[in-house]
Amino acid sequence: MQVCRYASTAGIRAGLRHPWGHSCTCTGNWLPEFAGIFRQNSGGFWLQEPGAASLGPSEPTPYEFNQMMNPLIDELIELERGLEMSVFSVQTNRRQQEYVHAHLSLARLDHMARIQVCGHAVSLSSNISEMTHDVLDLPLRDPRQVLYDKSAWLNAPPEQQEQMRKRTGVIFTEFDRLPGWYSLTMCPPDPMHLIHLGTTKFILRDILLLPGMMTPRAHQAADDSPLFEKLTSGKAEQYRHLEVVLYAVLFVAWKEDDDLIPDGLHTRGSRNSKSYKFQQKQAKNLLDMRRKVHHYDRQPRNTQPTLVSCGSVQSRQLIYRTILRYCLAVKIVHSRQVSCADLAYARRLFSRVAVDFARLNIPLTPNWHYLQHLVDSMLKFGSADQFWTFYYEQFNRKLLRVNKNGHTMGVLETTMARGFLKRAAAHRLVHDLQSIGDPRPDDISTISYVLGVMRNGPEHKLQHGMLNAVLAGEAHFCGQERIALATTSAQVNWMDNDHRPFWDMVIDFCNTQINEAVVYSYGAPPNGGVRLEPRGSTRCFPYVHHGGIRFGNDFQTQGKSSRYGYIKDLTPVLIRRIYQCTFQLEDQDEPHRILCAVIQRFTPALEQAVLPWDEYVDRLEVQSWAYDELEPPKVVGVNVFTGVFALGDIELNFGRYWLTFAMKPVEPEAFEG
């Protein structure tokens, strides 16, 4: 039996109240995509060096990090070779002993953890070559040469290791002990830190907010600010959601009365304003970098760059077009289903965006270079959602929220580690005593006594290996149901005004789902008729989960935040109710249940809006609809929902429209244009 695993490791440090530590999360690849993101379906580990006095307030040294990773790597090597486990067989409906092999195929790491775990960095001799040559013309690294350099570094004296690292750019880490491990292809760049917390945050902060591109207009109302005044510690998911609507937000903020973005430069502000000072600081940084390049190229003195030539070009039209291309590229890399042609197009878009920003005299961060390598990783691992670290960062956040009762600087962690080591020593003692060939009565009584006093001992059966339990059919992963109902629901009285208009429609839908009987509401029962009782037969759920996506209704408070959704052909709908009807059919012991939803489709606009993103409307998956107009209600099954969208409105000279921005589909084929 073959099992493939994904691993994510990250350092945890949140101020002085929390010590530095490392967490590692392992996820199997046999789960569906919507179920693999749940923390219940992942195994988490808190890594600490054996015998360490404390986790400590600072980052561990490479030696300490290797000591923390050593037990995990040993177990992965054992799984690679194969372990005999009790596996549940679907064919025989019994457990049987089989050898299980597991292989670590992907490590999801941020950029700094990637350097620490993989031991790879750019060598001094290649710093210039990547900037002066085309990426496709660069020579490829030989994996055998990389492995040779790592082995040479490991066997070199400590005083020579640093020189070898600067020359080759690699060091040996614990992960290099894994068979077939080649970190350059198994550790792709992390899209969360690279895009959402990297380039997107850079655009909002260094291009839009700090230079003053989003300053309020003259005589603008205080509550009509197009964007927040200052950028605080935003979360990756917030930036990702903003990427879906950013181009529309900028168009609403910058358009004039003629529904066009003016062709001109934005005012730089007064000399004492924060925006002007930031522009000057940005120009000085760019001037320093250009002078270094000018000196390196040995150009004449009379062509040296000046501070005026390094000032950013604040053209709203040029910046808007560039940001629109950026949002389109991000939309492509986060699609559930992408082709090689789509990825090549996204690479060209990222390159064009970086070049355009550079031509506008905007100094860029290294993240814009790493974006070019993201597409290469997607050719192997698929969509960027397959290897971003957002869900694992959520696990780390839950670890940080553990109540430590005022014990800081690793005191509580050290106490827990010491207790773990004591229990491990007790288990080793029991194992040694049980291995005695001819035990004496004193040995047997000692074993019984130690087992009785040990907490979480094997006789309590409280700690089971999750992988063993699942393979043996004794435990189940959480959240594998395609449709999951809310934990609470309300009893429906069909005579109430809130539900009475939908009674007949629900009955008609139930008749299409049941072939053994005829459902009716009132009056004389037909042949084989089953009545949908006014009371006690139906419950109203605030929301359901379909394919890991939540769909709610606009009737109950718990579901109003998710009351919009897509059905087939990217048709947006408003979900009015979610009902579950229960019938007791003849010759059936179990009651028959039908789950349905009352929806209202959006109404197409009589005159389509003309917007600046119409050229990319199919790829961006944005549509315009008649404002505040809905079609009559209709009852459908909840399995027809195909995704969710963000809803906004825009007012133009020729009308007001609803805008729908596709965000997340249930199926890969749902959002195909």
Image: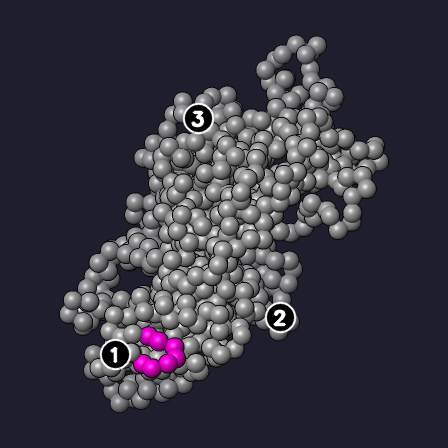
Q: Count the marks.
A: 3
Give the class, few, some or many, for how many residues have Cα within 10 Å of label 1's Cα (few <14, many ≥20). Answer: few
Residue 387, image x and y in percent? 42, 48
At label 2, which amino acid type do we have?
His
Q: Per the image, is 655 magenta?
A: no
Circle number at residue 527: 1
Q: Which residue is mark 2?
A: 407
The mark nearer the N terminus, 3 or 2, is 3
Which x, y percent locates residue 80?
27, 54
Q: Residue at x 41, y 63 (%)?
A: 635
Q: Mark 3 packing: few (<14 Cα in 10 Å), some, or many (20+)?
A: few
Who is closer to the viewer here, 395 or 598?
598
Residue ID at (24%, 73%): 516
Q: Quadrant of the N terminus?
A: bottom left
The residue to which callout 3 is attached is 135
| Magenta stretch in the rendered image | 519-525
Q: Nearer the viewer, mark 2 or mark 1?
A: 1
Q: Picture coordinates of residue 53 (x, y %)?
A: 54, 64
132 left or right, relative to 100? right
